[in-house]
Image (cartoon, rainbow, N blue to C red):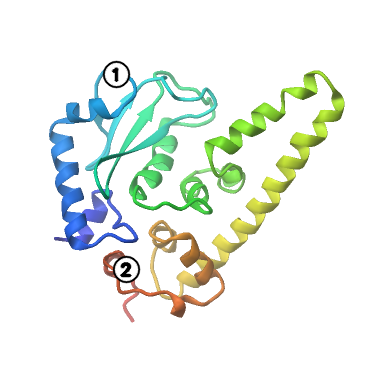
Amino acid sequence: MDLKEIYYEGLVVGPRECKTALQRRLTAVKDLLENPSLLQDKFPFPIPSFERKSASLLTFRSDKKLPFWIGAMTWVLEPEKDVAIPVLQLPTKRRIPWLSEEEIVRHEEVHARRALFNERRFEEILAYHTSSSTWRRFLGPLFQTNKESTLFLLLLLPPFFSAWFYSIPALYLTLLLLRLMQNQYIYKRAYQNLQKSFIKAEKVLECLQDDEIVLFAKGKEDAIIKTSLRWQQIFLLFKRQN
């Protein structure tokens, strides 16, 4: 089992994934790539056809279940216990004029690599840091979940009836922005500290859990237990050789 090769095929070892579980996931991914039709009954709607976007990522085009303000979505399917298979859904037509499909796919590939990470705080920051735009890298992660963006859109409806209600979405947006500024600061500090011991610090961050990012930002990386299979993969790929 070559952990480097697995990474370059688009798979990051999960936080609690052992060798046995990883091997099960590799087998499941291989089977589904060879026969994508096995995924059909995992979706709540029919899929016209699957395409292979990368070594380990399947994609399909459909507008169903895809909110109009979202450029793409990564489904995480679980064909068996502790086995997560990411599948990328792209719209049938380009939705966001200023975003290329290549940038959208890079963004979603971060979510796909982190399919076994159940983390929320830095997930969108990690994905948006693949953007070519400085503004999108900073402001793009304003919403951490689809529910947050949906709530904001709903809060915009009352102003059509009363100008006073404009203060509610404005307050909500301010709170989200303050949270984002704090998280972006933590991300930047963690990145700076990671550079001391690792190459490609941004790629290391994609392999970390939220609490690990916070500890690196505080300079307390010694408090992190680095004996897992995931950390073996990180060291093999990114550890600086003194």
The residue closer to the viewer here, 20 or 142, is: 20
Secondary structure at badge 1 equals loop
Amino acid found under the numbered disc labelled 1 = Pro
Residue 55 locus on image (x, y percent): 22, 42
Which residue: 77% across, 41% down? 171
Taking 92 as reference, is 102 above or below it?
Answer: below
Amino acid found under the numbered disc labelled 2 = Trp
Displayed quadrant of residue 100? top left
Earlier sequence position, callout 1 versus callout 2: 1
Secondary structure at badge 2 equals helix
Q: Which residue is mark 1?
A: 46
Residue 236 locus on image (x, y percent): 26, 68
- Which tag is nearer the camera, tag 1 or tag 2? 1
Displayed quadrant of residue 167? top right
Residue 215 locus on image (x, y percent): 51, 71
Q: Is residue 178 left or right of residue 4?
A: right
The residue closer to the viewer here, 95 or 70, is: 70
Q: Quadrant of the N terminus?
A: bottom left
Residue 166 locus on image (x, y percent): 81, 30
Taking 116 as reference, is 211 above or below it?
Answer: below
Displayed quadrant of residue 58? top left
Q: How many marks?
A: 2
Tell me whether the residue at label 1 lies in contact with that at label 2, contact meaning CB atoms closer than 8 angstroms. no
Taking 48 as reference, is 57 above or below it?
Answer: below
Q: Is residue 40 left or right of residue 152?
A: left
Which residue: 32% across, 68% down? 231
Q: Is residue 12 left or right of residue 20?
A: right
Residue 231: image tag:
2
Which residue: 47% across, 29% down? 71
Distance Cα–Cα, label 1 vs label 2: 39 Å
Q: Quadrant of the C terminus?
A: bottom left
